[in-house]
Amino acid sequence: MSIQTTIASAAEKLPPSLARIARTIADDPTIVVDSTITEIAARCDTSVASVVRFCRTIGVNGYAALRMALATELGRESVQFPAASGFGSEISAADTLREATAKVAALELLAIEETVANLDYDELAAAVEAIDDADRVLLFGIGASGQAAADLGRKLLRIGHAAIVLTDAHEASAAASLGARKTVAIGFSHSGTTRETVHFLQTARAASGTTIGVTGGPASPLAENCDHALLTRAREPRLRAGAMVSRIAQLALVDCLFVVVAQRRHAHTIHALQRTADATQPLR
């Protein structure tokens, strides 16, 4: 996972003094390249010791290592996305139309690349095996995560799987409580802390169902309460009404999951997709 994604993922979970450092760097990563550790500490209204602690918390040996990692990453990404002026920084009021849209496009492309590059293929294979063997698949998420759940549900239905997309938290928990060995429950939450989604998986697990979590939080309650955790990677900008980049990462993972499930019964899948396509043609 990139150092910027690591910082963005950690920002919401850190104590206040370290969170200020994370948000300052997320807003403009070049500040680390251009500033000393003392200057960073002053800008974040904290101490040099806190900056060192922040570096170690995100898995970097010290400020010099953080500086080197960010300089290398920013250089590589500026070459990869030359249209995104000020790449790596937050979308600001001063950005032009082209700059704002270029930043969004670059972040979404990176989310797909990082999510796929960091897939745990053992976990993915186990999740695919469980879905393919299931008598029914329950899917649940709230908000934008619910959209990703619905997308996978529609795809599985098209190839003959008994997929049920649940949109009400009470109904989701009720359905999960009636699970059995052949039930698979898939919960979607980027933060991994959505209470209703965690409860949904806990309930399914208690009823002996197989549980799969799709989340950007590797140490989150969601990841800890499922049998198989499929992790997304996304640098979500603060300027948003809801999930943007994280939604794209979830949808990329949904497509990977669906394709591998479909690939297991290739001939059946092709036939099912053709039949469902024919059935949904406009009436003549």
Image: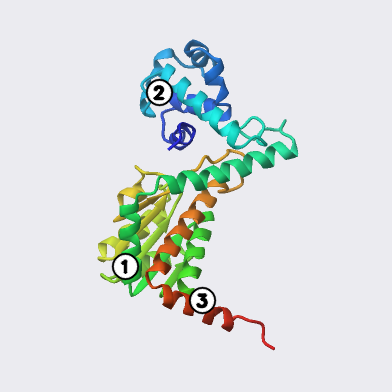
For badge 1, the amino acid type reads: Ser
Q: Which percent across, then down, holds residue 87?
A: 61, 32
Residue most toward the bottom? 284
Other residues around mark 1 within 10 Å, as few (<14) / some (14–19) / many (≥20)? some
First of labels 2, 1 by sequence position: 2
Other residues around mark 2 within 10 Å, as few (<14) / some (14–19) / many (≥20)? many
Q: Nearer the viewer, residue 161 or 136?
A: 161
Q: Is residue 214 visible from the viewing direction of this image?
A: yes
Q: In the drawing, does residue 102 fall left or right of residue 252?
A: right
Q: Residue at x 72, y 30 (%)?
A: 94
Q: In the drawing, does residue 208 fall left or right of residue 102?
A: left
Give the structural element (helix, strand or loop) at label 3.
helix
Other residues around mark 3 within 10 Å, as few (<14) / some (14–19) / many (≥20)? some
Find disc 2 in the rendering and name its residue. 55
* Mark 3 touches mark 2? (CB < 8 Å): no
Q: CA distance from mark 2 to mark 1?
A: 43 Å
Q: Is residue 160 visible from the viewing direction of this image?
A: no
Find disc 3 in the rendering and name its residue. 273
For badge 2, the amino acid type reads: Cys
